[in-house]
Image: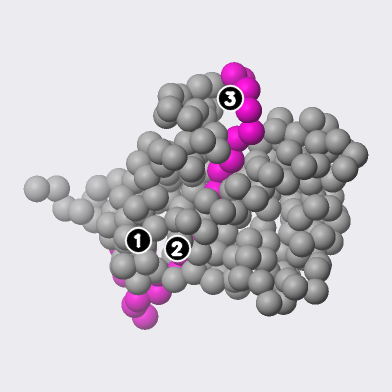
Amino acid sequence: MEDECETESPIQQFHKKFDHVCWFDDNGKVHKLSEFVEPLFGFELELLTQKTDDEDLQPFYDESVARYIGESVRLGFFHDGSLERGFEIASKPCTLGLLLNDFDWSFLNRAERCGAQIGTMIGEMGFHVHIDRRSFANDEHIKRFRRGILSQVNSPDCEKSDWFTKNVYCKPIEADDDKYCAVNVRPDRTVEVRCLVPTFSESRIKEYLRYLNETINNTKGDK
């Protein structure tokens, strides 16, 4: 049997995360990115996996955790420079219907069972949702969407909310030149929402996705 240490690592280099060339529809069918027809969502969840004080053994521990969680055609594991110990789980672009009804979320339970940790100050925040820019009618629509999210984050109830957080990695401001804002309008095809509290809960992530989709719809016009 081949030595596990010599097999290809399940954790890919960070730059490969942006090599998406396809997306999955409600039925799991694969489409080219150029065949865009409806809002597309993707997510990133940062995991802290510190279980050893031996720096040389940490990469092998990370790999064993990734193998236990299990890869799929809709998920990938990536090294993230903001994480000294651990890695990031990232999904490929999917429709809301697939994420709500036919996505395998069991990896969340496995990640939690193996002792991986999440939190609002891990790495650059811990949990991000990316939305294809083509999900919005135009730049003004994106601005209204961002303001809608910020109105929630900056409300007096935010301090008591277990939905939103704000810190140096997700500043509650409108800024087009600052990656670390609550809604980061990226130049590379996506709008990134950074202010949602990380969770291992499938139901909570689905609530987040429904909320973001409703906000897209509610900010289409001058409402």
> With respect to residue 57, does 23 lie above or below?
above
> What's the residue type where badge 2 is placed?
Phe
In this image, 127 relative to 29: left or right? right
Q: Eyeballing the image, is 20 above or below 123?
A: above
Q: Is residue 44 magenta?
A: yes
Of the image marks 2 and 1, the number of the one nearer the N terminus? 1
Residue at coordinates 60% horizontally, 35% vertically from top-left? 40
The amino acid type, in three-letter code, at marker 3 is Leu
Q: How many neighbours does mark 3 have within 10 angstroms: few (below 14), some (14-19), or many (20 or more)?
A: some
Residue 115's x, y, as percent?
A: 35, 71
Q: Answer whether labels 2 and 1 touch (C-beta < 8 Å).
A: yes
The quadrant of the picture occupied by the C terminus is: top right
Magenta range: 34-60
| Secondary element at tag 3 | helix
Q: Disc 3 marks which residue?
A: 33
Res 119 quadrant in image: bottom right
Secondary structure under the numbered disc 1 in the rendered image: helix
Q: Is residue 151 left or right of residue 36?
A: right
- Residue at point 52%, 51% (across, down): 206
As shown in the figure, which amino acid type bears the numbered disc 1? Asn
Mark 1 vs 3: CB contact within 8 A: no
Q: How is the image coloured?
A: one colour
Q: Residues within 10 Å of mark 1 (few under 14, many from 20)?
A: few
In the image, 190 versus 55, the foreground residue is 190
- Labelled disc at residue 3: none
Neighbour tally class for label 2: few under 14, some 14-19, many 20 plus, Cα within 10 Å: some
Numbered disc in front, either 1 or 3 = 1
